[in-house]
């Protein structure tokens, strides 16, 4: 397909040297709507050196350059209107002054034949101008009715308000921002006139400016029964609106010129690409180029205003990403933060304990005896002995909990009564040893060593001090 496109392009460019003419690319309109965002459409005409259309060019030969873009957007679709199955909105403008009376029959026949030859998906309309500009038939798919109305035009006006007629034709197209517009997006005004104007309210600059703004090319067919110089005005209007001009020296040439314009309209190209422009309601430059192996052969540009709207899908996507990032940050903070030490409380008095305390100072002050761990994972810890009974074991519900796998959950109990401390084995797996001897029950004396599993605890009684309170 790429080879065929290049061959067609080469054949279209070959006549340049022979005819001393240049092929041309005209971008008429770029359509960027909110409903189809970000898909953009461009309508353009390629005129070969021989003045005819250039069909069969593939999307690989086109590039679109938008404001601030260097690489160019890839074309998603590049087809002629016929190939794409789309039509065009064509409005025929006829000069109805008496100067055209000598060719009234040929002109009516050519106009009717031109409208009838349009495609099934094309729409047609008709404007006549003489003493005033009149919309003879609005744009419609009923081309037979439009042709019939065009055939009723009387060529007897004394004036020829050319520019007013063109402004009336441009105004017949629906507004660019009209919603639910069923008419085809490609547009064209086809003018048959002698180029004279004798009193229009508008002027050529107004016509050209409005046509360029609306993206409507003016294809002119020039024939004059009087002066030939005004025909240059038609050529100027066509060139400045990206249209074409075709002279019709004889009345019989009008039909052939209109047929050539029809072919050019049918072979207008429809390009589609994904726009990178912001939807900010501002003007942006869009350039479309015809390229072969990165060499630009033809190019044309225009200014397009993008719609202003808030892309809720993109906003939702950004919001979702922000939420994910926020959640991830919160999770990282939660798991990586420096956590405070858990509150430790005394198993006897339930008072809050400082991390650096190995025993509760209050309980040590009140206790008459304590266990000092001499061996095991809890070595160095002191356990004051208060109350009537103290349980020992590895389980969490013991008053004295030992970090020793050889100690049973409820290993031993200590009975306290009238200053006597008696240790009792509660059916442990490894038994209770006092001073190295296994015993089920025994009264403890100061200095006794109790072995539970691999943990050794020394029993110490409180001794009265020489002066002041008793000390350990």
Image: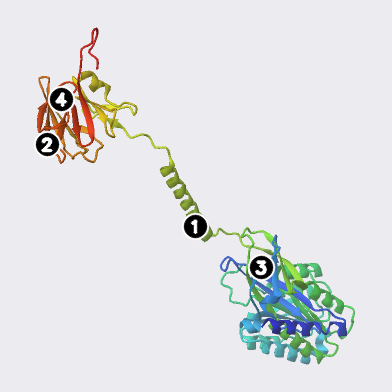
At numbered mark 1, what does the secondary structure look like: helix, strand or loop?
helix
Mark 1 vs mark 2, foreground winner is 2
Q: How many other residues sit within 10 Å of disc 2, few (<14), some (14-19) or many (≥20)?
A: some
Image coordinates of residue 267 in percent, x first then y, are 70, 83
Between marks 4 and 2, how big is the CA–CA gap?
A: 18 Å
Circle 4 Cα neighbour tier, 10 Å, few/some/many (<14 / 14–19 / ≥20): few
Q: How far apart are the two marked residues, 4 and 1, measured between alpha carbons?
A: 65 Å
Assess disc 3: are there few (<14), some (14-19) or many (≥20) residues with their C-alpha within 10 Å of its C-alpha. some
88 or 388, which is in the foreground?
Answer: 388
Does 442 sit above or below residue 162? above
- Does 53 appear above or below 432? below
- Reading the image, the residue beneath label 3 is 73
> Splitting the image into 4 quarters, where does residue 70 fall?
bottom right
Tell us which disc is closer to us: 4 or 3. 4
Mark 4 or 1, nearer chain start: 1
- What residue is at 17 percent from the left and 31 percent from the top? 436
């Amino acid at each position: 397909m790429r080879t065929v496109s290049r061959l067609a392009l080469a054949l279209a460019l070959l006549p340049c040297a022979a005819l001393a003419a240049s092929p041309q690319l005209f971008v008429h309109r770029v359509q960027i709507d909110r409903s189809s965002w970000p898909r953009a459409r461009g309508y353009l005409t390629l005129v070969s050196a021989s003045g005819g259309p250039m069909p069969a060019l593939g999307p690989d030969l086109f590039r679109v350059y938008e404001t601030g873009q260097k690489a160019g957007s890839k074309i998603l679709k590049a087809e002629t209107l016929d190939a794409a199955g789309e039509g065009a909105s064509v409005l025929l403008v006829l000069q109805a002054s008496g100067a055209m009376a000598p060719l009234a029959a040929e002109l009516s026949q050519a106009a009717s034949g031109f409208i009838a030859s349009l495609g099934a998906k094309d729409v047609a309309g008709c404007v006549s101008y003489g003493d005033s500009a009149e919309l003879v038939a609005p744009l419609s798919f009923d081309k037979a009715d439009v042709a019939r109305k065009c055939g009723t035009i009387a060529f007897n006006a004394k004036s020829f308000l050319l520019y007013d007629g063109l402004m009336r034709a441009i105004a017949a197209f629906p507004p660019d921002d009209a919603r639910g517009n069923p008419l085809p997006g490609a547009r064209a005004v086809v003018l048959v006139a002698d180029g004279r104007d004798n009193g229009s309210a508008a002027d050529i600059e107004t016509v050209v400016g409005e046509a360029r703004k609306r993206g409507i090319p003016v294809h002119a067919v020039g024939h004059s029964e009087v002066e030939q110089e005004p025909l240059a005005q038609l050529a100027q209007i066509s060139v400045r609106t990206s249209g074409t001009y075709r002279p019709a020296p004889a009345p019989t040439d009008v039909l052939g010129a209109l047929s050539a314009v029809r072919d050019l309209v049918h072979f207008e190209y429809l390009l589609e690409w994904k726009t990178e422009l912001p939807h900010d309601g501002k003007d942006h430059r869009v350039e479309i180029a015809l390229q072969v192996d990165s060499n630009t052969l033809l190019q044309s540009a225009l200014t397009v205003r993008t719609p202003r709207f808030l892309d809720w899908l993109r906003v939702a996507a950004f919001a979702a990403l922000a939420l994910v990032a926020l959640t991830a940050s919160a999770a990282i903070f939660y798991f990586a933060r420096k956590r405070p030490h858990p509150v430790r409380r005394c198993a006897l008095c339930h008072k809050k304990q400082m991390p650096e305390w190995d025993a509760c100072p209050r309980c040590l002050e009140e206790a008459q005896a304590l266990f000092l761990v001499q061996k095991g994972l809890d070595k160095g810890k002191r356990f004051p002995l208060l109350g009537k009974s103290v349980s020992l074991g590895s389980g969490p519900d013991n008053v004295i909990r030992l970090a020793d796998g050889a100690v049973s959950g409820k290993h031993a109990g200590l009975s306290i009564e009238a200053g006597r401390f008696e240790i009792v084995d509660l059916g442990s797996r490894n038994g209770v040893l006092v001073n190295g001897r296994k015993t089920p029950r025994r009264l403890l004396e100061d200095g006794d060593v109790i072995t539970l599993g691999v943990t050794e605890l020394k029993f110490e009684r409180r001794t009265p001090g020489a002066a002041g309170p008793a000390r350990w």
